[in-house]
Image (cartoon, rainbow, N blue to C red):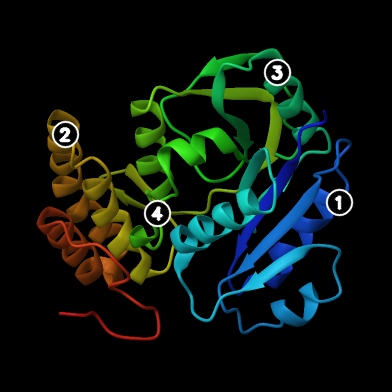
Amino acid sequence: MKMKITALVVTYNRLEYLKKNLAALFDQSRKPDEIIVIDNASTDGTYEFLKDQKVKFVRLSENTGGAGGFSYGLNYAIENGADWVWMMDDDAIPYNDALKALEDAINKRPDAGVFLSQLVSDSNSKPKEKIKSAWFGTFVGFAVRKEVVKSVGLPDSEFFIYADDYDYSIRIRKAGFKILRVHSSLIDHKDWIKQKRVFRFPFSKPQVPAWKTYYLFRNPILATRNFKIINLAVTLYLSIDRYIWSYVDPSARSYIFKGFEDGRKGIKGKRIDPRKPLLS
């Protein structure tokens, strides 16, 4: 019996990215058996656009972040009969044979619970015929087996954005499932960076809105909280990095320090909203 592979896309106010993402999914040599889009209450015309597309979509009543969108969408996909769910953000552009390469790997290695596409930032990158073990994966090209979801549960929506995929990977590996990276399954996913120099030494950081840095500093601490040595290393690194990042992007300083503090306190949930000031 043919396995049902569902492509799951989470989007929020990035309609132009979403259009390119869906075009790439429609153009796969091995078509997804179903495409599900979770719209995090976008206000940019995404809803009107999706009504005319050959996809299933759910418009949430509020922005639950990537973590909330993937958690809801993964559950929705499994309930709709998916054997595998291939998860990605709206700015991911899968190569034409990306899903076919994943399916080939699934057939070769039925012992694994997760297969990861290889992320590249150069659209001319060439696929490599190798499959390697991975410690964790991001929710961009993250293909998970339904049995894993039933055993481990869903991603933790309380992360809102960032590190939910890292936390989920840890839980999957802890449950005894293998995570493999498929280097012939390519997804174009750009990294945008900011850079400043200190005495000619360049410091580079992801180019994200200042409010998002709260979650970039809080969530890695939360995701490693059950692993004392790793958590100590992450906390030490971030305690130094908060000063470096604040130099690269001074507008993010208050968010960075608040995120670090809340991570140490174990505070979860949607604490920072781009439309509102810092919550106390």
Q: In this view, does 167 lie to the left or right of 184?
A: left
Residue behind mark 4: 162
x, y percent for residue 51: 81, 76
User: Where is mark 1, residue-wise?
Assistant: 26
What residue type is disc 3 on?
Lys
Whether 229 is drawn above or below 268: the answer is above
* Residue 30 placement (x, y as % from top left): 86, 36
Mark 3, mark 1: which one is toward the viewer?
1
Inspect the image, locate mark 2, and give the three-letter code of the amino acid beneath it: Ala
Q: Tell me whether circle 4 and circle 2 mark residues in contact (CB < 8 Å).
A: no
Residue occupying image coordinates x 75% and y 64%:
56
The answer to the question of whether label 2 and label 1 lie on touching residues, with beta carbons closer than 8 A, is no
| Circle nearer the N terminus (3, 4) | 3
Distance, label 2 to label 3, CA atoms, is 33 Å
Q: Distance between the residues labelled 4 and 2?
A: 18 Å
| Count of numbered badges drawn on the protein | 4
Label 4 and label 1: CA atoms lie apart by: 27 Å
What label does residue 233 carry, if any?
A: 2
Q: Which residue is drawn at 28% across and 53% down?
A: 219
Q: Name the residue under label 3.
A: 128
How many angstroms separate mark 3 from mark 4 (CA)?
Answer: 28 Å
Give the label on residue 114, or none.
none
Q: What's the amino acid at mark 4?
A: Tyr
Which structural element holds mark 4?
loop
State which quarter of the image contains the N terminus.
top right
Q: Which of 216 and 146 is in front in this view?
A: 146
